[in-house]
């Protein structure tokens, strides 16, 4: 899997109007892994789906829990610090967090075993489900439909 192609797709989709705020809301509300969701969309665009979403979740779990989430928490804490030096550190942590997100994508690319997808949106829809997140089916479906519309995938 081409790491750079995945990254370009991620940056393009995440940068579309309304996408980032919706992803961040889902991340805060229920712990959605934005990278994982975007990776599911990427695979679908390529006509592929992961053989096991759970296996991918396990592949990135430690990296997300021990690197990405602590960096995110540190960056958020620093946001309200008034010292100029703290804000300079926040920018460094923000850059490190982005690099950690990119490494997570590399982990996903290296770990994924794919199968042919007849529905390009099925894997992303399966990931965003009440089985994984503390959301109702209607909330999952609504968020999924909004993401698809905002990213121009429907």
Image (tube, rainbow, N blue to C red):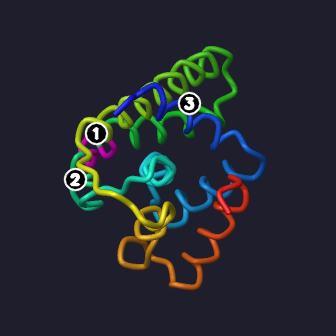
Seen from the viewer's position, the closer of residues 94 and 57 is: 57
> Which residue is painted at 28% across and 39% down in the image?
63
| Above or below, 113 relative to 136 | above
On the image, the x and y values in percent for residue 118 come to 42, 65
On the image, the x and y values in percent for residue 4 come to 46, 25
Which of the two labelled residues, at mark 3 and mark 1, occupies the earlier sequence position? 3
> Which residue is painted at 34% across and 32% down in the image?
106
Mark 2 falls on what kind of element?
A: helix
- Report the mark closest to the observer, 3 or 1: 3
The residue where tag 1 is placed is 63
The residue where tag 2 is placed is 58
Which of the two labelled residues, at mark 3 and mark 2, occupies the earlier sequence position? 3
151 on left or right of 76: right
**Distance in Å between CA atoms under marks 3 and 1:** 21 Å
On the image, the x and y values in percent for residue 84 come to 68, 16
> Which residue is painted at 55% across and 38% down in the image?
10
Mark 1 falls on what kind of element?
A: helix
- Badge 2, how many Cα within 10 Å: few under 14, some, many 20+? few
The residue where tag 3 is placed is 8
Seen from the viewer's position, the closer of residues 27 and 56 is: 56
**Distance in Å between CA atoms under marks 3 and 2:** 24 Å
Quadrant where the image shows the C terminus: bottom right
What kind of secondary structure does the magenta stretch mostly adopt?
helix
Label 2 close to label 1 by CB (< 8 Å):
no
Magenta region: which residues? Answer: 60-65
- Badge 3, how many Cα within 10 Å: few under 14, some, many 20+? few
Mark 3 falls on what kind of element?
A: helix
133 on left or right of 80: left
Q: Magenta includes 64? A: yes
């Amino acid at each position: 899997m081409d790491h750079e192609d995945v990254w370009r797709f991620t940056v393009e989709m995440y940068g579309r109007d309304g996408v980032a705020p919706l992803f961040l809301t889902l991340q805060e509300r229920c712990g959605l892994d934005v990278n994982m969701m975007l990776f599911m969309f990427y695979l679908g665009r390529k006509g592929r789906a992961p053989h096991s979403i759970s296996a991918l979740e396990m592949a990135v779990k430690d990296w997300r829990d021990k690197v990405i989430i602590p960096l995110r928490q540190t960056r958020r804490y620093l946001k309200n610090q008034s010292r100029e030096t703290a804000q300079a550190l926040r920018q460094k942590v923000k850059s490190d967090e982005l690099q950690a997100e990119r490494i997570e994508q590399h982990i996903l690319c290296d770990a994924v075993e794919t199968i042919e997808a007849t529905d390009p949106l099925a894997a992303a829809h399966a990931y965003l489900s009440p089985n994984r997140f503390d959301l109702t089916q209607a909330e999952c479906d609504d968020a999924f439909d909004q993401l698809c519309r905002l990213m121009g995938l429907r």
